[in-house]
Image (tube, rainbow, N blue to C red):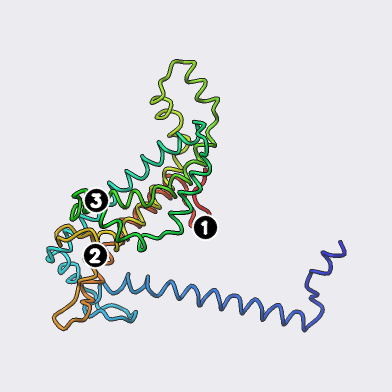
Amino acid sequence: MRLMSSLQIDETDPMTTVKALLSRIGLYLFAVIVGLFFAVPMLWLLTAPFDATPGLNVSWPSFTLDNFKGVFENPRAVTSLRNSLVLAVIATGCVVVSAAFAGYALSRVRIPGRNLLLYMLMLFSAVVSGTATMVPTFLLIYEIGLINTHTGVVLILTGGMLPTALFILKDFMDSVPRSYEESAQVAGASSIQILKDIVVPVVRPGLAVIAVWALVNIWGDFLTPFILLRSADLYPAAVVIYNFYDETGRPDLSLVSAFAFLYSIPVVLMYLFVNARYGFRFHGGIKR
């Protein structure tokens, strides 16, 4: 009680009250500055695509839809969005399915050195970045004949994300009560039926976590497709937007702003879907 009373602000002391007030004002100002730091790029992304003369500053737009017309008339822009969608869906599916099977196996089967293997995979995937491994990655894909193919990009993206996805998903698999599976086995269910009808519904929030995390990373990845793809027709949106310049060599802000707006829509829709389906919270992950 003495400690609690010593921590309370003495409201009868004017100096203490002024210090507490100034401290709170300083905290609010810091929060406003940090909020503006993140809000200004978002405001530019929301206003510049509809501005007839977009610039680098945030301003009230003179409304037009001609910027989007320019995007749809650009053959590389539409093709790149389709390529990004194909790469993101296939690679995300590969990451989720592979991590689910591997996580279930590591959770249920006693393998010597299982935890050591998992932590080593996690350690190497975190310490050795994708940039540092680009040369051996390029040589590997070249030797197996998958250079300039979406298949090679999907394999590299899936392999790079699998250790972290496996590390996260194994915890969800460990939380599934084994009594559920034992009851199903007594009733005659096969291993595939147990996995599909019992394990997957229980760990579905974990699968959603992995899906969102993988899709966001794959959707925004620039380096892997830039290194492994040679044909402009195969480039995803993250690479194509890098080439939107006008005749003078400056970024074409009309095209860049409208394309960036369309490019961000799938990720936003993904977050909204997960929020509606699983109760996603930006500050606390996903409710279980």
* Amino acid found under the numbered disc labelled 1: His
In the image as oriented, which residue stretches furthest toward the right? 2
Residue 41 coordinates in the image, percent (x, y):
37, 73
Answer left or right for 278 relative to 223.
right
Say whether disc 3 or disc 1 marks the residue closer to the N-terminus: 3
Q: Which residue is mark 2?
A: 239
Badge 3 marks a residue whose secondary structure is: helix
**CB under 8 Å between callouts 3 and 1?**
no
Say whether disc 2 or disc 3 marks the residue closer to the N-terminus: 3
Q: Which residue is mark 1?
A: 283
* Amino acid found under the numbered disc labelled 2: Val
Taking the spot 37% from the left edge, 40% from the top edge, the residue there is: 98
The residue mark sitting in front, 2 or 1, is 2
Q: Nearer the viewer, residue 138 or 85?
A: 138
Q: CA distance from mark 2 to mark 3?
A: 16 Å
Image mark for residue 152: 3
